[in-house]
Image (cartoon, rainbow, N blue to C red):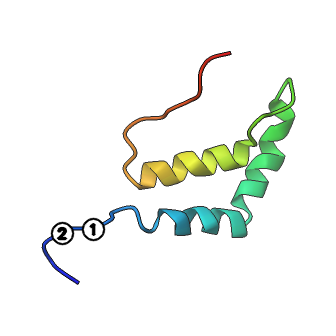
Amino acid sequence: MTADGVGVVSHTGAELLWELAGFGGLIDAWDAALIGTYKAASIHFPGAELADLAVGTSASAEALESGPAK
């Protein structure tokens, strides 16, 4: 262990936050609340997407990326 900050990964707790959202029921609650608002079949469930956004924000995410437009 060093105190110089070399080799430090600042987002090591991000997976723990995502797992907490899953095991705590937050992802399922978001899915249940929002899945009825979709007009077509969803490709990605809203609970997982919102958890990704929340965890990314907590880990100082600077940009959101999406796939190619269809």
Residue 33 position within the rendered picture, expressed as x and y whole percent measured from the top left? 80, 45
Q: Quadrant of the N terminus?
A: bottom left
Q: Residues within 10 Å of mark 2 (few under 14, many from 20)?
A: few
Name the kind of residue labelled 1 in the image.
Val
Q: Camera-side residue: 39 or 13? A: 13
Disc 1/disc 2 C-alpha distance (Å): 5 Å
Residue furthest out toward the front = 7
Task: Write down the residue under mark 1.
Answer: 8
Question: Which corner quadrant of the image does residue 10 belong to?
Answer: bottom left
Question: Which corner quadrant of the image does residue 39 belong to?
Answer: top right
Which element carries disc 1, helix, strand or loop?
A: loop
Please determine whether, in this image, residue 2 is positioned above or below residue 18: below
Task: Write down the residue under mark 2.
Answer: 5
Q: Which mark is residue 59?
A: none
> Which residue is drawn at the image coordinates 27% and 68% (left, top)?
8
Name the kind of residue labelled 2 in the image.
Gly
